[in-house]
Amino acid sequence: FAAALVAYQIRQTEVAVVTTFDKTSRTNLAPGLKFRLPWPIERVYKFDNRIHNFSKKYEQTTTSDGRIIIIEVFVGWRVADPGLFLERFRGDLAAAESSLEGLVRDAKNTTVGRHRFADFVSTEKADFTGIEAEMLAAIRPKAAESYGMDIALLGIRQIGLPESITTKVFER
């Protein structure tokens, strides 16, 4: 029982933050057996360090040539700075993904607004991959600085057209 009061374990898939009287005292990134003072003095917060999947809902966006397209974006993220992540979200993954949603929306609208409609329906894979890379480059530094998150991957899951445009396409 005494060992459980002063020892804790960090698994390979976790990162941990130790707080002393609710102030971050140390961040443990290496897995293994660690020691701490009993609970009223020090508290351990553990976070899953594996990639979390987040999918931005299907939303309309306008291209640089004024065409409306509907895009769904997915993001893979992990906790990079557990101290900052704890400070911002207190370990709440839903709050973290809600904040990430705003970053994804801004990057998506900005990036799509710089490209023509033809870039999204092109058969050239390099063009499409470049658009995803632009979005990733826009999100990655903001997420790391503001939220303690590392954006591991970003991609466009699905592209669609509004019903008014698909009707015109079928008429042609």
Image: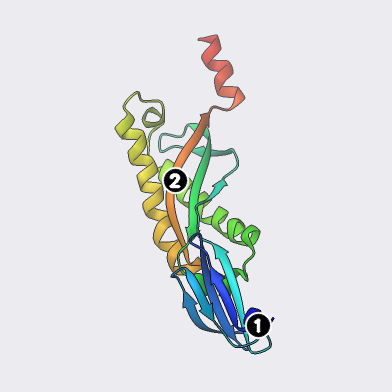
Q: Which mark is residue 154?
A: 2
**Which quadrant would the N terminus be assigned to in this image?**
bottom right
In the rendered view, tell whether residue 114 sits above or below residue 33. above
The number of discs equals 2
> What amino acid does circle 1 point to?
Leu
Q: Position of residue 87 (x, y in %)?
A: 57, 75
Q: Which mark is residue 87?
A: none
Q: CA distance from mark 1 to mark 2?
A: 41 Å
Of the pair 147 and 70, the residue shown nearer to us:
147
Residue 84 seen: no
Asked if the residues shown at circle 1 and circle 2 are in contact, with their CB atoms under 8 angstroms apart, the answer is no
Q: Position of residue 138 (x, y in %)?
A: 40, 54
Residue 64 seen: yes
Mark 1 = which residue? Answer: 5
Residue drawn at point x = 55 percent, y = 71 percent: 9
> What amino acid does circle 2 point to?
Leu
Q: Position of residue 166 (x, y in %)?
A: 56, 19
Q: Which comes sooner in the sequence, label 1 or label 2?
A: 1
Residue drawn at point x = 57 percent, y = 53 percent: 101
Circle 1: element type: helix
Residue drawn at point x = 47 percent, y = 31 percent: 67
In the rendered view, tell whether residue 97 sits above or below residue 15. above
Of the pair 11 and 52, the residue shown nearer to us:
11
Crowd rating for badge 2 (residues with CA inside 10 Å; few <14, some 14–19, many 20+): many
Circle 2: element type: strand
